[in-house]
Image (tube, coloured by chain):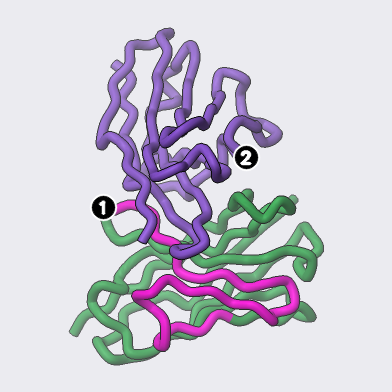
Chain colours: A purple, B green
Amino acid sequence: SYELTQPPSVSVSPGQTASITCSGDKLGGKYACWYQQKPGQSPVLVIYQDNKRPSGIPERFSGSNSGNTATLTISGTQAMDEADYYCQAWDSSTFVVFGGGTKLTVL
Amino acid sequence: EVQLVESGGGLVQPGGSLRLSCAASGFTFSRYWMTWVRQAPGKGLEWVANIKQDGSEKHYVDSVKGRFTISRDNAENSLYVQMNSLRAEDTAVYYCARIDSSGLAFDYWGQGTLVTVSS
């Protein structure tokens, strides 16, 4: 079955750039998206089709996907960006796959 | 405004059944694939099932195949999942979500409903 691997945690200082990776076999050949989930809240889509931002998502959120790795980048990270982030892709065998999630700490 | 409101969660004994509902509003429900995603306490997101606009195509994660059935009523703007033979490992918050027009992302999520399977 297809799997997506994320680092369990990433730390970043306020104002700096945070990068969260998501690895999977030939992931660059699929579309990846990213969700933000704050404690006690539902997930929110922040990036879809590798690098598109839904309406209302700040420009500091960006994405890329190539080879075996998709990356979510948050530029000028703010305290409000502290959350869990999940990547997701579609696979012909497993259908929908989520990564295990990355806890972003802003300190 | 797109809204998805889940209901039907609760405490159920192992082997029991439960039916979750998701009431949709603010968009033309019949034009979108819909999905259920769950999250066990303290764990990550797990996709459960998808259903096509007209209900003619359904897909499930292996762990629920034969036990869960996803369905929809476009006249009532509602999504459902019938869960049978429930196990402790099915304990989770269950979210319904809309699949966007590209078919590749879940663009709106409900608030979730908690299902606890325990004796």
Please tell me whether residue B2 is drawn above or below residue B55 in the rendered image: above
Secondary structure, mark 1, is loop
Please tell me whether residue B22 is drawn above or below residue A102 in the rendered image: below
What distance separates the C-alpha of mark 1 from that of mark 2? 28 Å
Q: Relative to A15, is A30 on the left or the right? A: right
On-image quarter of the C terminus of chain A = top left
Q: Which residue range is magenta in the image? A: B43-70
Q: Position of residue A2 (x, y in %)?
A: 38, 56
Amino acid type, residue under disc 2 in the picture: Gln
Query: Which residue lies at the image location 54% right of the left edge and 42% below the top edge?
Result: A29
Q: Position of residue A89 (x, y in %)?
A: 50, 49
Amino acid type, residue under disc 1 in the picture: Gly
Return the mark for residue A49.
Answer: 2
Q: Position of residue A100 (x, y in %)?
A: 32, 47
Q: What chain is tagged by disc 2?
A: A
Residue A88 magenta-highlighted: no
Foreground residue among A67 and B22: A67
Secondary structure, mark 2, is loop
Query: Which residue lies at the image location 45% right of the left edge and 25% below the top edge?
Result: A80
Label 1 belongs to which residue?
B42
Mark 2 surroundings: few (<14), some (14-19) or many (≥20) residues within 10 A: some
Foreground residue among B10 and A96: A96
Q: Position of residue B93 (x, y in %)?
A: 39, 63
Mark 1 surroundings: few (<14), some (14-19) or many (≥20) residues within 10 A: few
